[in-house]
Image (tube, rainbow, N blue to C red):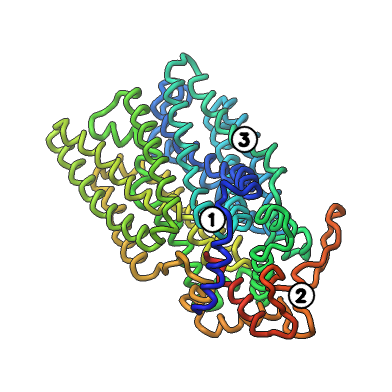
Amino acid sequence: MATTKAEIAELSSKTTVWYKDAGRRRLYGLVFVAILSSATNGYDGSLMNGLQALPSYLSHFNNPAGAQQGLLNAIQSVGGITSLIIGPYLADFLGRKWTIEIGCCIVVIAGIVQAAAVDVKMFTGARFLIGMGSGFSGLASPILITELAHPVERGKVTALYNTMYYFGAFLGGWITYGTLRINGNWAWRLPSLMQAAPSLVQVFLVLLLPESPRWLVSRGKDEQAFKILAKYHANGDEQDEFVRHEFAELKASIANDSSGKGRWAQLFNTKSARKRTAISMACGVFSQWSGTSLTGYYLSDILKGIGITDPWYSNRLNGFLLMVNMFEAWFWALMVDRVGRRPLFITAASGMCVTFSIWIALTAKNLATHEVSYGQGVVAIIFFHSFFYNFAWISLNVAYPLEILPFNVRANGLLMQNVATYVCLFLNQYLIPIGIQKGSWKFYFLFLGMLVIQLITVYFFFPETRGATLEEINRTLDGADAVDALKGTELDAYGTKGSVSHIETKGGDDDDVGGVTYLNEVAGSKNGLQVQDDRNLRRRSVEAAHDSRFS
């Protein structure tokens, strides 16, 4: 495959860096609207953390504690799980963009109801709806981002999606800190209302986003899909060689992925499919069972357990921790293509095993001796633990499954990842206050055990995808036979008979898209290459195209 890699590397080298390219600058400006979906979930965790330190909130809802406190947090995850029942069908049949729009509308309405809550039941119901709405948008947004991004930046852009969790959490943490100064119920009503702000922005701006080219091709709207790729990846140049390779590979991969029957069955019907599904679900489990949920939703309880009860200190520490986490997550998201996925996963898991062990030891000593220094040590180790978590489990939690899942089961596969995430999140939110109340620091050993399992799993079962070609990914997960089958499909997409290689357009449903003929000379005339009756050249073009998927 040396020739193939050399060809695709040459095509990539001709691609202008994104900030010097008007089309991609415009694309990523629009993509940021979809990235905001992650901020809603981040805001929620920080909001509930901050509210538990607000006297007016505790007084209004009669000091919720234990199981009731856990339910108030966990009901958002129940709403998220509910959204997953129909979310994939919305994403596949209405499109990625409209699924995001529906989810954001639900969150806006629920945010208003939450802020106006007069009792625990009304507040709980609103949080359920927030979970359901953010579940819809959280499922469709990363898929749309992955399928719109230029292959050269796809890894970084997709990894950045989940880091916006910390941006939302950062806003929620400092907003609740600021409202500590407000006397009365607006101290908790205002930050509750502000939870709808990111979704309100999205309600108006999501409509400006282009639809996923892959989804459009799967619906027979080839012309519209090709025009979107040309507009945003080549500034409207429909003769751009890279875009034509990209589009041909897209059509071929969808044709190949759609050849099977039963999208749900395809998640489990082969050994490689089961491995992909298991890895995707493992990402959801490990992102929630790494110990960070202790501080994500119950930092005030953790601090009270080591003798720190000042609400001002608690909310200030929460805001500062989230700010540090946000910058760390952004940095490592930009490093995923330079460092690789496996090194980040392994470093994160091994580092957290060490830091969490120290966390447990310091907490036990603090409770036994009541020495302030041990409590200060716990606060410090929380920052170190989050540092290692941010290596991988924010940026790659969603991006990694999207890399290994084929198009036809991408929504369903991401649903499985989301199911694992929401179930584990629910268990965390509900069980942590009970576990701390009943078992104190000994409860933490549950998370340490999961961190050891995490390290073993990522070391032995997570393949590297950095710079990997589609062939290499498929050889790892599917075997050599699947590679040959895909190549054959791609050659069919380009055409191997007749005097001119081409891909027939199937036409779109939109009136504003005129009929076009494209890819009529696959290799392009700018290099003086002729493709008539030259199967070897077409094969090299196909291989170059399929190599681009994971570049």
Q: Amino acid at mark 3?
A: Ala
Name which residue lies at 78% across and 62% down: 223
Against 545, residue 24 (above or below) is: above
Query: Which is closer to the viewer, label 3 or label 1?
Result: 1
Q: Which mark is residue 409?
A: none
Disc 3 from disc 1: Cα separation = 35 Å
Residue type of the residue flagged with mark 1: Glu
- The residue that label 3 is drawn on is 110
Q: Residue at x 69, y 52 (%)?
A: 235
Image position of 386 (left or right of 31)? left
Q: Quote the CA–CA distance across marks 2 and 3.
A: 50 Å
Name the secondary structure under disc 1.
loop
Can residue 229 be seen? yes
Residue 153: numbered disc: 1
Hey, what amino acid is under mark 2? His
> In terms of image quadrants, where is residue 196?
top right
In the rendered image, residue 517, in percent from the top left (x then y), is placed at 81, 67
Q: Nearest to the eye among marks 2 and 3: give it.
A: 2
The picture places residue 131, in percent across and down from the top left corner, at: 56, 43
Q: Position of residue 1 (x, y in %)?
A: 50, 79
> Contact (CB < 8 A) between labels 2 and 3?
no
Judged from the image, the secondary structure of the residue bearing numbered disc 2 is loop
Which circle marks residue 502 in the picture? 2
The residue carrying pointer 3 sits among few (fewer than 14), some (14 to 19) or many (20 or more) residues within 10 Å by Cα, namely many
Viewer-proximal residue, 195 or 163? 163
Residue at the extreme left of the image, as rendered:
369
Q: Position of residue 79 (x, y in %)?
A: 57, 46
Q: Is residue 82 visible?
A: no
At mark 3, the secondary structure is helix
